[in-house]
Image (cartoon, rainbow, N blue to C red):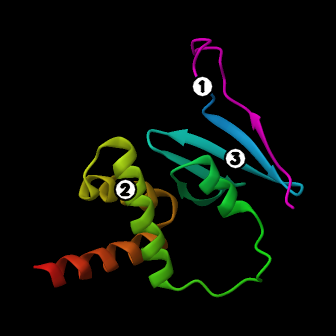
Amino acid sequence: MNAITWTDRTNYRNASSHRQANVWDVTVNGKTYRVERSPGAYHVWDGLDWVGMYATPADVEAAITPSEQGDSETTDADVTKAFEVKADEIAKANGWTIAHTETVMLRFLRDTSPDEAATIAAALQKRRDIAA
């Protein structure tokens, strides 16, 4: 079983005392990730590399916990499907439309992971072309 610890790293100096944590160091088997909560999503960083955006702390833990099945090749279809699932979760959590959620997520990805953003944007455009 993988031991997971969440250590609060929120700067409370300018925040009220009742505010929930919004920055953590999450450690899994000796490896530490930085997790930052923004409205409707948890962003995970491995050093300077963005790992992904997740809807719940349980999703974060599942994403950073080493798999016992071995590593398999991730395809563009896998990336797009994961993006669509997270967009749906975040849209429901915030009461946003899917289109708005995808736009917000893509804007963030363009700054942090341009290749991933391009893959997803192309897949979303194909989906829109087919629907039209």
**The magenta stretch spans residue 28:** no
Task: Considering the whole magenta stretch, tell me its main secondary structure.
Answer: loop
Question: In the rendered view, does 99 fall on the left or right side of 78?
Answer: left
- Going by the numbered disc 1, the residue's amino acid type is Gln
Query: Where is residue 40 shown, x and y percent of the image?
Result: 44, 43
Q: Nearer the viewer, mark 1 or mark 2?
A: 1
Q: Residue at x 66, y 23 (%)?
A: 11
Query: Where is residue 43 shown, x and y percent of the image?
Result: 57, 50
Task: Mark 2 or mark 3: name the one nearer the start of the chain.
Answer: 3
**Distance between the Cα atoms at labels 1 and 3?**
16 Å
Question: In the rendered view, does 63 fall on the left or right side of 6?
Answer: left
Q: Is residue 22 above or below residue 30?
A: above
**Distance between the Cα atoms at labels 1 and 2?**
26 Å
Q: Which residue is mark 3?
A: 34
Q: Residue at x 55, y 40 (%)?
A: 37
Q: Which residues are magenta?
A: 1-19
Query: Where is residue 120 shown, x and y percent of the image?
Result: 39, 73
Task: Mark 1 or mark 3: name the one nearer the start of the chain.
Answer: 1
Q: Is residue 131 above or below residue 28?
A: below
Mark 3, Cα crowd under 10 Å, few <14 / some 14-19 / many 20+, is many
Q: Which residue is mark 1?
A: 20
Q: Which residue is mark 2?
A: 107
Q: Residue at x 41, y 78 (%)?
A: 119
Q: Secondary structure at mark 1?
A: loop
Q: Residue at x 25, y 52 (%)?
A: 97
- Going by the numbered disc 3, the residue's amino acid type is Arg
Residue 97's disc number: none
